[in-house]
Amino acid sequence: MMTDTWIHPSAILLAGAVILPCLPKAWRKVFMIMVPLLAFADVLSMQGHNGVFGVMNVMDTTMIFGRVDALSMVFAYIMSLMCIIGTVYGLHVENPVEQSAAWVYVAGSLGVIFCGDYLTLFLFWELMAFSSVFLVWFRRRKESLATGYRYLLVHTAGGLMLLAGIVLRFKATGGDMSFGPIGVGSPQLYTWLILAGFLLNAAVPPLHAWLPDAYAEATVAGAVFMCAFTTKTAVYALARSFAGMEILVPLGVIMALYGVVYAVLENDARRLLAYHIISQVGYMVAGVGIGTQLAINGACAHAFAHILYKGLLFMGCGAVLQMTGTSKFTELGGLYKKMPKTLLFTLIGGLSISAFPLFSGFVTKAMIVAAGFEVENYWAAFLLTLASAGTFLHTGLKVPYFIWFGKNRCSKQTWQRAQDPPKNMQWAMFIAAALCIFVGCYTPYLYDMLPYPQVAAAYHPYSASHIAETLQILLFTALGFFLLLKKLAPEPTISLDLDWFYRKGGRLFYWFARKPVQTADTAVGEAWNREGIVPLMRTARFWSWFDWHVIDTVVDGTARNVRALGGKLRLMQRGKLQTSITYMAVLMALALAFLALP
């Protein structure tokens, strides 16, 4: 039961992140399990205790670190649970700082989930970006360094847009910093800026290219954390402040279709999964845009399920990368003989994400589609249904087939290295797989946690029509896959994305700064040297000569003459009064004589 002392789960993770690298190696694994378990237990203790906690007054601003309600609890529950699974998956990692960075990243996400004001949100929002980039850099490849810097620059730009919106809103509202419904009916400039900051983290095209680059280049364990937190934290922020904003519906549908298309084209398994995050988050963004209670429930439920099955898929493909050294389809195949357990867990993730009956995606994704039909937004509902077919095509069929069942394209070294991963990685995959099945079979487990549990209880996913419709889509997609198998065979190519425009724009800006601007700057500098600096130096040299030869000669010469006269007068002083009176009398006589001359 929750006491009067409220403990933020982020505080537990941040403290653990600081202590972990200092511990002896023999104690680290026990500590690594204990810290996320304590954070999860802390979240569990908050259930049924809604309210505002952790309020601080800083510089005439109220910071709220703990707003506990149904919306924040469903996200906090799954994110702290995923922290346990991700930590177990990474127990074999030798570098403790990588695990510390992951915990700081999760702490930032939970900080956003529980915050009640924009200042607190911004602090934790930036903490996520600046900690998660290390999960890319710790892979220690040349590509990792470049990808990490690009990731950081993009998220810094998003953070600046968010900060600008917060400042403008603070001014427009007379100092209101509360984080809640922002007024989507009459959006202002600050509304669009805050929305842009959230949409960048949600990877809405064209602000999405950072995601497949960073997630595919992250460490094996780091990618499991990254796929679960940034985009879903953005979904939470959208649900909290932009529910019912109509522009999110077409944006979400575009995401759902866009991610599917690029996932089909991908040759790298982890880039495929990263692109499909865009597609799946599109369902959630569309649900927030629809804005009804059923749609918000669907967005939250799908985020819950997505964290589990996408984490499971990244764990499976990460295990392949770790054990074989590659995640490219053109360098794999036939691994069912070498990695059967990894195959089983990845299949469960693929069936879950494809919304197969009895798996988690089946009871969450259709809730958003049903909400679309409920408000007569038929075009969005139909297109989201179409995207489901693409999901099964590439994640449910392409990934397992070309890694485990297709033609063996493995090199001799790859084949010899291939085997199921260490036990801790298998246990993490087992936990996630079991939860994917449990959520799909026992819906009250998830539905009772949703923001509107009464609406969720009235929704029945296992209707005959829904099961028949889903099976038809899946079976026809499978038929199309095997009929077009040769056309869908992977090729070692690179797909151009919308980032091409700002990459080329960046090169154009670099050329513009280097050629026209620098040339003009050089010309101006040379002209100034010729017409300004040279005459100025000549003038300075003249006045230096004048000062030395004229001013100093007159002043110093006069001083020397006065000094000489003084010396001669000093010689006339003998210390006797009579002598001095005689000199003065002589001088006065000479002066009178001079004056008496005609």
Image (spheres, rainbow, N blue to C red):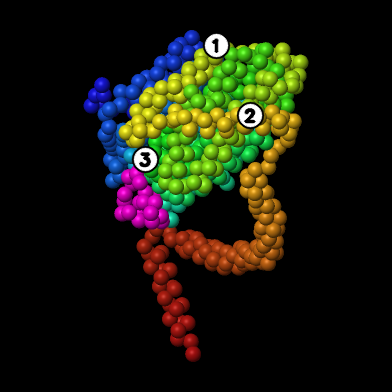
* Residue 360 image point, x, y percent: 47, 26
Q: Which residues are magenta?
A: 166-188
Magenta stretch containing residue 73, yes or no? no
Q: Between 416 and 118, which is closer to the camera in this rendering?
A: 416
Of the two numbered discs 3 and 1 in the rendering, the one whose residue sits closer to the viewer: 3
Left/right of residue 554 with respect to residue 450 in the rendered view: right
Q: Is residue 226 visible?
A: no
Left/right of residue 84 with respect to residue 341 in the rendered view: left
Cα distance between the residues tagged 3 and 2: 34 Å
Residue indicated by mark 1: 423
**Residue found at x 71% / y 55%:** 515
Q: In the rendered view, would you say 571 is above or below 272?
A: below
Residue 293 marker:
3
**Residue found at x 69% / y 58%:** 516
Of the two numbered discs 3 and 2 in the rendering, the one whose residue sits closer to the viewer: 2
Residue indicated by mark 2: 478
